[in-house]
Image (spheres, rainbow, N blue to C red):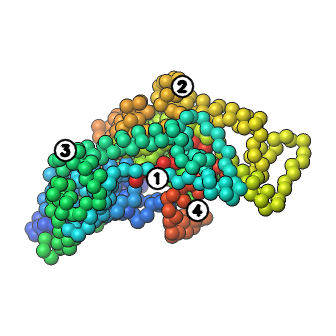
Amino acid sequence: MLRLIWKALLWALLLPLTSLRWGLSRLRPRPFALQVVLEGAHPERGGPRGLRGGPMGISRMALRRALREAAADPRVTQVRVRVGPLTGGWAEAWTLRRLLQGAREAGLKVQAFLAASDLRSLWVASASDALVAPPHEPLTAGGLAARMTFFAEALGRAGVEVEALAAGDYKSAMEPFTRTGPSGPNREAIEALLADLDGAVVTDLAAARGVDAQVIRDAFAAAPLAAPEALAMGLLDRLAAEDEVFDPEADGRTVDAADYAGRPSPWPRIRFRQPRLAVVDLRGTIKDGRALDPAPTGAVPRALAGALAKARRSKRIKGVLLAIDSPGGSATASEAMWRAVRRLAAKKPVIAVMGDVAASGGYYVAAACDGIVAAPTTLTGSIGVIAARPTAQGLLTRLGLFQHTLGPGPRAHLLHPGKRLSQGEREALQRTVDDFYQVFLARVAEGRDRTPAEVDPVAQGRVWSGQAALAHGLVDRLGDERDGLAWLAERVGLAEVPDRVAYITPPRNLRAVVRGLLSARMAPLPAAVQEPLALWQQVAEQPYQAWCPWRVD
């Protein structure tokens, strides 16, 4: 009640100021172009992205709000978009492209300047009415590719090997440490995924540019293309330098989307209604332990369970959207998170929405929800389990170090890296991996209303695109966070998505804040090194993993 009274008083105090601003805007309207800069990472909401995030751009939520306001603002003459190098994944790029398409459908004229010539940037920029590129920069878009680095030979030269056991023919997370190239099933899955993504991108580009799909494939095959060649093939509308496109003196006033406050209103914008829907994030590698992640991402069971419990206890929150962007991680932590989600789902509707990747442990948690939404380009599935342990017996021998184990426990040092697994130990470990895989299948079967036998053919550790996952019944709808909220609103009986949504994050202690600041200032390692190192650390901490190792460029 006190909060409501305070808001009413604040509204009354602000009313004269907002009315004056509105009156001046009506007497002297000043047209302007809305400028949008798409470069680096664009998370759904602002927040830390970790070492892989790169430069932080406007959040998708803020961009969505700015474009919606601009469509109702007669002062906005056009939207000018500068598309630079994008470091987010393909699902993030799909949402950015969709936002530009929505702006055009709402009546806005969208002009894009292609400041980066890679495929992801071209795909996003192609959603504009007019696509401009610099006259002297070649178009480097050459199609999609997946990179994998294999370390087995290098480790062998150092006297180190990795013993890995997997449940699922396609569960390939440890292959970089055990092979010098992809296995047959792994290659099959990668090529199928790339074909899915390539088909979607080529189809979108061909439709946006009004050319045949073969023209796009020919352009990829001939990359890099000189700018005049790309123009002649219909991939661009015109060539111009950046200062010719974004010259405020020549083209009138511009307002950056991050600073745009929307169409002036005579009424103060104070929201009196309390949110009835909540969003909880699950980002990053899923880990064991009670300590919080450096950022409040919910990547440990304690953090996620605490956020979900807060939503469960709230009397005003009627439903929860679980936003997942995770390649998975610890299988035991994934199971703990699954149980926390099921506990909430027993009381309130829970919908999962997937970001760039929600695979393996990320999909494990999503399977506990009442429904799953994914972008067509989301990497998902990877329903499988691995166990691995590095063995340095060869290295120790080379160094002249010899270890002897004493004591009555014959398998007390089962996971110690100083010796190789015996045949009996390997068989016992494989049984536990297979058992965990059956639990994983049972969790997915329960969530998808199928039997484990029906899930197994599309499991086996195979990674799918969101489009393929929909066809195989692993997700329910294609879309992004806004679509997930719309579905959640429908489930709780709301006519539309409320303007205000609660975002619940775990609390952060001082140590977590300091660690987050330090990690944000560290120079990022190359992905080819950083990702395997992260997996190596994971298996050192917990041998049972539900992890998806892929990266698509």
SS at badge 4: helix
Residue flagged by tag 4: what amino acid is it?
Ala
Helix, strand or loop under label 1: loop
Residue extending farthest to the bottom is 249
Three-letter amino acid code at the position of disc 1: Arg
Answer left or right for 250 relative to 276: left
Of the residues tagged 2 and 1, which is closer to the observer?
1
Mark 2 vs mark 4: which is more N-terminal?
2
Residue under pointer 2: 452
Crowd class of label 1 (few under 14; some 14 to 19; many from 20; radius 10 Å): few
Q: Residue 147, which numbered label?
A: 1
- Residue at horizontal 54 percent and vertical 59 percent from the top: 529
- Which element type, helix, strand or loop, lies under badge 3? loop
The three-letter amino acid code for the residue at tag 2 is Pro
Q: In 3D space, how far apart are the residues under numbered discs 3 and 4 (Cα atoms)?
A: 52 Å
Q: Which residue carries the number 4 mark?
A: 512
Look at mark 3 in the image and give the residue it sits on: 212
The CA span between labels 2 and 1 is 32 Å
Q: Give the Cα distance between marks 3 and 2.
A: 43 Å
Label 3 is placed on what type of residue?
A: Asp
